[in-house]
Amino acid sequence: DVLKSITLVDTPGVLETADVHSRSYDYIEAMRWFVEHADLVFVLFDPSKLDAGAELRSLFTSALKGAESRVRIVLNKADSVGHHELMKVHGALFWNLSNLITTSEPPRVYVSSFWSKAYKPDTNHLLFETEKQALLYDMLYAVPLEALDRKVANLLRRAQMALIHACVLGTARMKLPAFFGKTKGKVKAIENLSQIYQEIQGKYKLPVVNFPAESEYKNFLAAHDLYDFPKLDQLEKKSGLIRKVQDLIGVQIPGLLRSISHNTIADPRQNRILLTMLERQEKQAAQNATHVKTDQHKNFLFAQAVAHMGKGSANPSLGGEPETTTA
């Protein structure tokens, strides 16, 4: 059922002792591609392998840079060590990762044993089961909402870029002469891009940080004829395209963000944890009932033996006549 809603990609592991140049491809660049296309990234450790080698440092400082909010740490095979040793391993893991994680808040760490076999005895089974349910909740409920939030935010950013692009080209096109001096007019428009930027920012209330560098537009206009683009006033009067994009940016897309932020879902972990605790209580109650039944049976046999001895009957376990005491 889990795989019906998510896709898991198992990427190659990190080489700590071997030569990282032995790979036939750029491992960090390949991991960066997967990180950019993933909604959630799990980095797995086990208690016997906590060293932070060169390739792991490159993974955190390059491939995972900028995606720290999507990174989750998994401490697997947690039942292979005892309670006190597990605390030491958990602390050592954070110590090794402290120099690799630059964010103020460390990533979530899930501690459990993620396989189908039963947990080893004398380990914290309830903790492992709770961590499993928390990880499933993160994958199936929390992360899809965050991914949807990012998609809407990306849509907003792309709409703003499209509006800026149309405004810059349309405004520059309006400043070109209609008949004479076209070549000089195009050169002058390219040189006055900073003034065009200021005019658009004041008219449409667009933040300056969203504008591309002037050099990008100069390279773009060097390869394209500015006369091929429509004037800005034509876009506003005939099709109303600019007004529609402004409505999309100011009203429709923020409405999508509000609907996502106000969406509340029930936490399925509570029901699962409660069921797990009830199952354990039922098993314990069944074991206690068995012990009570055995004790009651023993008491019944003892009472029968005492009754027979009180009547002077022979002890069936010893045989012969009942014992007598002579003073």
Image (spheres, helix red, strand yellow):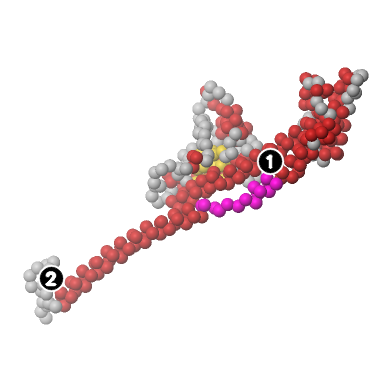
Q: CA distance from mark 2 to mark 1?
A: 89 Å
Q: Is residue 311 visible?
A: yes
**Closer-to-camera residue (310/133):** 133
**Closer-to-camera residue (187/247):** 247
Q: Which residue is mark 1?
A: 153
The residue under the point 37% across, 61% down is 285
The residue under the point 60% across, 31% down is 32
Q: Position of residue 188 (x, y in %)?
A: 89, 24
Q: Which residue is mark 2?
A: 315
**Closer-to-camera residue (310/211):** 211
Q: Position of residue 257 (x, y in %)?
A: 68, 46
Q: Residues within 10 Å of mark 2 (few under 14, many from 20)?
A: some
Q: Is residue 114 left or right of residue 206?
A: left
Q: Position of residue 224 (x, y in %)?
A: 78, 21
User: Which residue is farthest front?
Assistant: 238
Q: Nearer the viewer, mark 2 or mark 1?
A: 1
Q: Is residue 277 left or right of residue 295?
A: right
Q: Is residue 28 visible?
A: no
Q: Is residue 268 highlighted in magenta?
A: yes
Secondary structure under tag 1 reads helix
- On screen, 260 above or below 63? below
Residue 98 image-quadrant placement = top right
Q: Position of residue 208 (x, y in %)?
A: 80, 37
Q: Which residues are magenta?
A: 255-269
**Closer-to-camera residue (223/287):** 223
- On screen, 185 above or below 7? above
The residue under the point 57% across, 25% down is 26
Secondary structure under tag 2 reads loop
Prevailing SS of the magenta stretch:
helix
Residue 294 image-quadrant placement = bottom left
Figure disc tally: 2
